[in-house]
């Protein structure tokens, strides 16, 4: 039998469960986002706006490798949630062991490749001109810590699958606090510049890994794996890969978007335009924390109840998650619309960036109130193990709509064409996701089929 923690996912009221799962997830994402935000503020004020652009250039590579851990984590955690819901502990344990093995093999291999081709990758992702040297310093150091970050991202999703969101929240808070303290010490006090910013980030990954490792070897975790569980299992890897590929594809598209955006904006407006995108990108990570928290909280609830064949509870979790997330998205939208200028002035004193960023930011966040429908809809299909619709809906927003838009609209409208691509892509993908999610609810989640 699964422990009381995971069984609660199938018993407690959905609204209460969602708050219990989403609140720690939101706090964790908030702290992590604040870390990225404040880190950018520190770098911008203590090193310069070029340093902000340099970090933004490095993000696609480090994010993609770290996303492997997230992909393996979410793919495996979907299996674990459904296995715990169906009282199959043996499969849950084997899946967790395979997650660890696969994460180590893939991330270490990619880090080696990334270090070998460093001088080619940085210019390809927009690290040109004055941006190249600081980007190379940051990239080289941060890449050493990325396997630990990948293990943390993987472990964090498994902790949630066990029904222990508070521990997952702490795992996200620890590296954030550590990074900010080390930023202050290395950059402000010791004057180490980009070198200090990079080592602060890498050390924070190690702090997080230490905590996640402690969680799984302590009595807090119900997943006590043994050596045979690390042996790769073809059927588990296949299922994990098909589900994890959804997350990996999304992160791969994010990396491609960074590549395209950095190059398009550099050609349109130089280093300043890249820095503007870097600031907006940080705000996207930060401001949407409550919506993303609801999405994270929704995943184990939907997965467990689907595995237990409690389809009416799955339907209720979808409706409740969308309601909560859309309401929070509306609050975010209002904050950005009214305080865009004040937000930008926190990051930099560059007059050009201060003048141009607020309007661009408003365009980027214009569809925020409805984007929760797209996020929850895509997350549902991933939670219940339906890889193909999850993949297509996940890619619809940034891949199928956004990338073509940023390749076409700037040719006619210049830099404004880049910014209006965001809300158009959000609207189109939300409409598509709403259609397929509604169809799924009507055909597959009928009350009479619940156990």
Image (cartoon, helix red, strand yellow):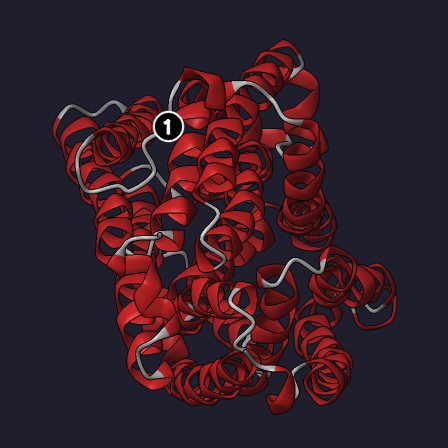
Residue 330: x and y in percent read 44, 89
Question: Residue visible at 72% across and 78% down?
Answer: 433
Residue 37 in sight: yes
Q: What is the total number of numbered labels drawn onto the structure image? A: 1
Residue 28: x and y in percent read 28, 57
Give above or below for 272 relative to 231: below
Question: Residue visible at 41% across and 86% down?
Answer: 324
In the foreground, 209 or 146: 209
Report the side of 66 relative to 433 (left or right).
Answer: left
Residue 396: x and y in percent read 76, 66
Report the side of 363 relative to 32 (left or right).
Answer: right
Quadrant in the picture for the C terminus: bottom right
Mark 1 element type: loop
The image quadrant of residue 439 is bottom right
Residue 54 in sight: no
Residue 148: x and y in percent read 39, 26
Give above or below for 229 relative to 307: above
Question: Residue visible at 42% across and 31% down?
Answer: 151
Question: Residue visible at 46% across and 24% down?
Answer: 147
The image quadrant of residue 286 is bottom left
Q: Which residue is mark 1?
A: 225
Residue neighbourhood size for the residue with mark 1, other residues' Cα within 10 Å, grouped as few (<14), some (14–19), many (≥20): some
Give above or below for 412 relative to 227: below
In the foreground, 403 or 325: 325
In the foreground, 426 or 311: 311
In the foreground, 35 or 416: 35
Give above or below for 227 relative to 146: above
């Amino acid at each position: 039998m699964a422990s009381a923690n995971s069984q609660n996912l199938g018993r407690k009221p959905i609204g209460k469960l969602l708050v219990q799962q989403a609140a720690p997830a939101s706090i964790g994402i908030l702290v992590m986002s604040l870390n990225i935000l404040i880190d950018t503020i520190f770098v911008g004020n203590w090193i310069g706006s070029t340093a902000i652009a340099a970090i933004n250039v490095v993000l696609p590579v480090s994010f993609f490798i770290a996303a492997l851990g997230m992909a393996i984590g979410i793919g495996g955690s979907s299996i674990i949630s459904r296995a715990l819901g169906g009282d199959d502990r043996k499969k849950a344990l084997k899946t967790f062991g395979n997650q660890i093995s696969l994460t180590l093999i893939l991330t270490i291999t990619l880090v080696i490749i990334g270090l070998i081709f460093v001088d080619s990758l940085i210019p390809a992702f927009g690290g040109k001109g004055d941006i190249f040297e600081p980007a190379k310093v940051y990239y080289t150091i941060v890449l050493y810590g990325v396997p630990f970050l990948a293990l943390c991202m993987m472990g964090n999703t498994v902790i949630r699958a066990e029904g222990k969101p508070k521990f997952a929240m702490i795992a996200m808070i620890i590296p954030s606090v550590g990074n900010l303290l080390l930023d202050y010490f290395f950059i402000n006090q010791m004057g180490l510049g980009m070198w200090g910013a990079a080592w602060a980030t890498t050390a924070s990954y190690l702090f997080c890994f230490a905590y996640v490792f402690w969680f799984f070897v302590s009595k807090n975790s119900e997943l006590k794996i043994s050596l045979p569980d690390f042996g790769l299992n073809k059927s588990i890897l296949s299922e994990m890969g098909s589900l994890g590929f959804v997350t990996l594809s999304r992160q791969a598209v994010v990396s491609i978007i960074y590549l395209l955006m950095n190059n398009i904006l550099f050609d349109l407006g130089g280093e300043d335009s890249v820095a503007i995108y870097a600031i907006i990108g940080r705000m996207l990570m930060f401001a949407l924390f409550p919506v993303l928290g609801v999405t994270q909280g929704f995943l184990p609830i939907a997965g467990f109840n689907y595995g237990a064949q409690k389809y009416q509870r799955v339907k209720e979790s979808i409706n409740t998650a969308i309601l909560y997330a859309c309401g929070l998205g509306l609050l975010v939208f209002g904050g950005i619309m009214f305080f865009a200028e004040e937000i930008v002035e926190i990051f930099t004193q560059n007059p050009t960036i201060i003048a141009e960023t607020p309007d661009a930011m408003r365009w980027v966040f214009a569809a925020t109130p409805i984007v929760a429908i797209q996020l929850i809809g895509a997350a549902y299909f991933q939670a219940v193990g339906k890889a193909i619709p999850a993949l297509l809906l996940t890619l619809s927003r940034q891949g199928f709509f956004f990338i073509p838009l940023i390749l076409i609209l700037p040719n006619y409208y210049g830099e404004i064409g880049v910014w209006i691509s965001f809300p158009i892509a959000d609207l189109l993908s939300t409409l598509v996701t709403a259609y397929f999610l509604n169809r799924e609810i009507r055909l597959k989640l009928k009350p009479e089929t619940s156990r």
